[in-house]
């Protein structure tokens, strides 16, 4: 089960920064990023004040809490120890019911994202010994119980209810951001079970049990882990009362700015009719809270707010002949319910040739239990396309109508299930460009490097990915509300959808932070589409690294932090990196006098076709390192923006970045081909290298033959821009292995402005090494070794021109 209960599309993500009113402990000069593991209690009531305890590590210099939604004000903040932070908060009367994402900011960093739930009912704490069935904890109706289930524990609570009342027990478990699979049941005093629940579509993996009370009396609410497990992180909020609890709203959307007459379905007491004034802006998920008899549901139902009209199904519409007509112009939203097992709904709509369309089912995204199957047909009922899942249980098709006219669409459940809450919405819309920005995951199942803490007078870098749909061309990324003293620099996404972004803080920037926007648009003005930052933060990971619960945020946490003990510089390369070539980047570090820790250096962004070491260590007694790069022969010819990042252990990880520099990928100055060469063990040979020079260079270039087999060596040679070929002398030792060696290549170094341009050419060159031929039969014995005086030295002979392959074969045949 999946969900994203906090969504910037549901409500504005205005920023509320908790002001620090109470004194805090003096921070360590080298404290690292704060770590919040849990916020207790897990829920608070709106319109009240509450004391929160944040538990984790490195919390002794926390200065503020950053909330992603308005409605909570921090009135005091006090670090009890490095592992515990106490906050007193005020929750506004009109605070939004639901999940509040938060982070804490210290003078040295920003924590991972955690959550707090704001509900409508008083918070009651589950008390030890938690009670058994005979001794349950008494609670009032319409309260929220906060508790933690340990291994094999079962918590029991008792309420008094009257005949005919609706009694509901809804649990927030996994929706609190921790791996906990709760089970809840409502029983009478004789242990008769009125209702029980494990998983629900509305609650995801959280249960909701409801019943109509059969008679006045006491009723037991039981909660446990579904398999009788549990641990110290198995927190829950148990909402118990007579409040309405429908499972779904129908229709699942409406047109922005209009009144929408809808029904809340699935409540044990029956449907609830309500008319809602929809907001003027469109949103993919709008929270609705059903109310009845002065009571409100503790969690929302959700609908879409769109810019186009609704079409509601008209039964019967179970086949092409009875399809509900949608006569209006596209875009349209088709709404219906698969109200019994085996049900299938058909609609008829009009489309035009050349009008590319999205046909998208929205059901599970709004917590409907429907696992949709979507099909498209021509006017005669012939199937055109079909889809079950499109990355989620909701179906999707991209449709290019082959002609003007009528078409049919059908919706059913993949398992042929159905029921009164199996609602769906099919949106048929023209395809338009879309754009969002995210930060790629740095480490699996981690939020590491998803915030931007920038030390004063220093830099911090992250990657940003542009997720495009039907949109090309360069993009310009910007932020209009960064903290004071911070600027950003980046590339334009012209040739890659991932670019490095460097944030830099002035030396006098005030230490502080905020939740900042990040937006982008077309850089060439060819389209007016705009995109924003939208990050899915996975909070619960299940088997096979499957995300089970997450929050989605639309603000980037950015802060100016205290000075770091080191700063990195990346020297601008003076020459290009040629295709198939290599180079070394010079990275230097400015260290404060007593900082001797090693620094792990890595290239943040590898342009396509560029290889680099995963990381290099700069020892504590060094302030410089050469970082190697290499380019594939097919690397794109372009100037890229690159930077390096460095991490040191400063009582925890501390990251900084270099400035951005240009890395130019250029064509090689020449191409080369190595002729196949045969050699005999213990004898010299010569390798012929054919040259195809493309770019003139000054002076001479050095040529080195590499990739030789063991015990074989080559003499370096030089070439001029006019050379068409070069012969490289090779010495083959008697111990050089016999065989065909296909690993030879040439390294050619061209000098420009005193800097090397390294080419790696002619890869896959072949050297065949043969054993010496056996001595001939009846051959006279070799002459005795002469002991005469040493003859006068002769001038060295020039290396003979290597034989061609055909000449070598003829020579071998003659020797035999």
Image (cartoon, helix red, strand yellow):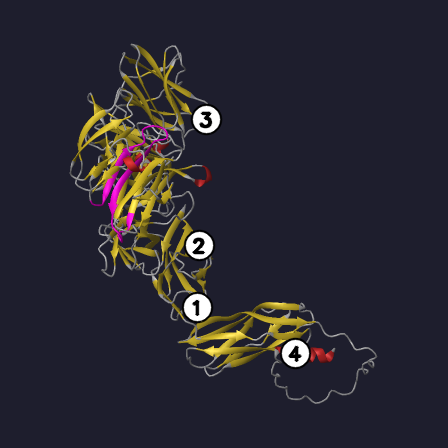
Label 4: which secondary element: helix
For label 4, the crowd category at 10 Å Cα-Cα, with few meaning under 14, some 14 to 19 and many 20 or more, is some
User: Which numbered disc, 4 or 3, marks the residue that appears first in the sequence?
Assistant: 3
Q: Residue 9: x percent and y percent?
A: 25, 41
Number of the front mark, 4 or 1:
4
Residue designated by label 1: 579
Residue 600: mark: 2
Corner quadrant of residue 548: top left
Vertical comparison of 520 with 574: above or below: above
For label 2, the crowd category at 10 Å Cα-Cα, with few meaning under 14, some 14 to 19 and many 20 or more, is some
Residue designated by label 4: 808
Q: Residue 342: x percent and y percent?
A: 37, 30
Number of the front mark, 2 or 4:
4
Is any part of residue 514 visible from this angle? no
Residue 229: mark: 3
Q: Do the residues bearing badges 2 and 3 touch, measured as CB atoms within 8 Å?
A: no
What separation in Å lies between label 1 and label 2 (alpha carbons)? 28 Å
- Boundaries of the magenta span: 329-357
Number of the front mark, 3 or 1:
1
What separation in Å lies between label 2 and label 4 (alpha carbons)? 53 Å
Q: Do the residues bearing badges 4 and 3 touch, measured as CB atoms within 8 Å?
A: no
In the image, is 194 to the left or to the right of 72?
A: right
User: Which numbered disc, 1 or 2, marks the residue that appears first in the sequence?
Assistant: 1
What separation in Å lies between label 4 and label 1 (alpha carbons)? 34 Å
């Amino acid at each position: 089960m999946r969900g994203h209960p906090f969504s910037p599309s549901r409500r504005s993500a205005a920023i509320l920064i908790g002001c620090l009113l109470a004194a805090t402990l003096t921070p360590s000069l080298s404290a690292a990023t704060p770590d919040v593991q849990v916020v207790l209690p897990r829920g608070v009531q709106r319109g009240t004040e509450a004391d929160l305890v944040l538990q984790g590590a490195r919390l002794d210099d926390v200065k503020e809490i950053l909330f992603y939604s308005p409605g909570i004000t921090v009135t005091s903040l006090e670090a009890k120890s490095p592992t515990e932070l106490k906050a007193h908060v005020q929750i506004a009367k009109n605070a939004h019911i639901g999940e509040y994402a938060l982070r804490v900011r210290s003078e040295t960093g920003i924590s991972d994202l955690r959550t707090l739930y704001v509900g409508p009912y008083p918070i009651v704490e589950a008390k030890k010994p938690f009670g058994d069935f005979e001794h349950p904890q008494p609670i009032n109706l319409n309260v929220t119980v906060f508790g933690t289930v340990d291994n094999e524990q079962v918590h029991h609570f008792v309420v008094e209810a009257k005949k005919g009342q609706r009694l509901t027990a809804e649990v927030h478990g996994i929706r609190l951001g921790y791996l906990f699979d709760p089970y809840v049941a409502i029983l009478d005093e004789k242990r008769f079970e009125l209702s029980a629940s494990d998983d629900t579509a509305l609650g995801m993996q959280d249960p909701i049990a409801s019943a109509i009370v059969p008679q006045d009396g006491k009723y037991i609410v039981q909660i446990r882990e579904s398999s009788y497990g549990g641990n110290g992180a198995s927190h829950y909020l148990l909402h118990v009362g007579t409040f309405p609890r429908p499972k779904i709203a129908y229709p699942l959307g409406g047109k922005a700015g209009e009144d929408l007459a809808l029904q809340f379905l699935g409540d044990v007491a029956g449907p609830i009719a309500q008319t809602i004034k929809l907001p003027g802006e469109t949103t993919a998920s709008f929270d609705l809270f059903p109310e009845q008899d002065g009571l409100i549901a503790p969690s929302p139902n959700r609908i879409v707010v769109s810019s186009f009209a609704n079409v509601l199904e008209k039964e019967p519409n179970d086949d092409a002949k009875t399809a509900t007509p949608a006569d209006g112009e596209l875009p349209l939203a088709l709404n219906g319910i698969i109200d019994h097992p085996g049900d299938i709904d058909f609609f008829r709509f009009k489309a035009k040739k050349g009008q590319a369309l999205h046909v998208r089912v929205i059901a599970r995204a709004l917590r409907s239990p429907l696992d949709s199957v979507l099909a498209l047909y021509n006017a005669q009922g012939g199937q055109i396309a079909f889809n079950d899942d499109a990355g989620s249980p909701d179906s999707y098709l991209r449709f290019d109508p082959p002609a003007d006219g009528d078409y049919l669409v059908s919706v059913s459940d993949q398992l042929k299930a159905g029921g009164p809450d199996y609602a769906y919405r099919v949106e048929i819309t023209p395809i338009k460009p879309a754009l969002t920005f995210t930060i790629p995951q740095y480490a699996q199942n981690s939020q590491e490097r998803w915030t931007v803490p920038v030390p004063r007078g220093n830099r911090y870098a992250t990657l940003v990915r542009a997720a495009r749909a039907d949109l090309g061309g360069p993009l310009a990324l910007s932020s209009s509300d960064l903290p004071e003293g911070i600027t950003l620099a980046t590339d334009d996404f012209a040739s890659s959808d991932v670019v490095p972004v460097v944030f830099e803080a002035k030396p006098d920037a005030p230490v502080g932070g905020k939740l900042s926007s990040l937006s982008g648009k077309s850089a060439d003005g060819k389209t007016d589409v705009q995109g924003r930052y939208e990050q899915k933060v996975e909070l619960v990971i299940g088997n096979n690294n499957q995300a089970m619960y997450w929050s989605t945020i639309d603000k980037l946490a950015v802060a100016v932090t205290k000075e770091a003990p080191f700063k990195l510089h990346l020297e601008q390369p003076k020459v290009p990196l040629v295709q198939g070539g290599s180079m070394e980047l010079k990275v230097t570090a400015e260290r404060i006098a007593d900082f001797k820790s090693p620094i792990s250096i890595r290239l943040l962004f590898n342009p396509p076709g560029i290889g680099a070491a995963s990381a290099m260590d700069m020892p504590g007694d060094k302030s410089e390192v050469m970082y190697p790069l290499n380019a594939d022969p097919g690397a794109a010819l372009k100037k890229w923006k690159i930077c390096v990042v460095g991490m040191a252990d400063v009582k925890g990880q501390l990251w900084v970045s270099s400035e951005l520099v240009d890395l130019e990928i250029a064509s090689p100055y020449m191409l080369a081909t190595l002729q196949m060469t045969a050699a005999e063990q213990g004898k010299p040979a010569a390798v012929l290298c054919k040259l195809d020079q493309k770019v003139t260079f000054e002076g001479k270039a050095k040529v080195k033959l590499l990739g030789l087999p063991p015990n074989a060596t080559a003499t370096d040679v030089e070439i001029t821009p006019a050379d068409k070929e070069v012969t490289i002398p090779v010495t083959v030792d008697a111990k050089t292995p016999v065989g065909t060696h296909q690993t030879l290549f040439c390294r050619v170094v061209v000098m420009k402005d005193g800097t090397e341009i390294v080419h790696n050419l002619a890869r896959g060159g072949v050297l065949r090494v043969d054993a010496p031929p056996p001595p001939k039969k009846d051959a006279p014995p070799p002459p005795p070794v002469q002991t005469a005086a040493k003859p006068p030295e002769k001038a060295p002979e020039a290396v003979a021109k290597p034989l061609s392959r055909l000449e070598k074969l003829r020579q071998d045949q003659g020797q035999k």
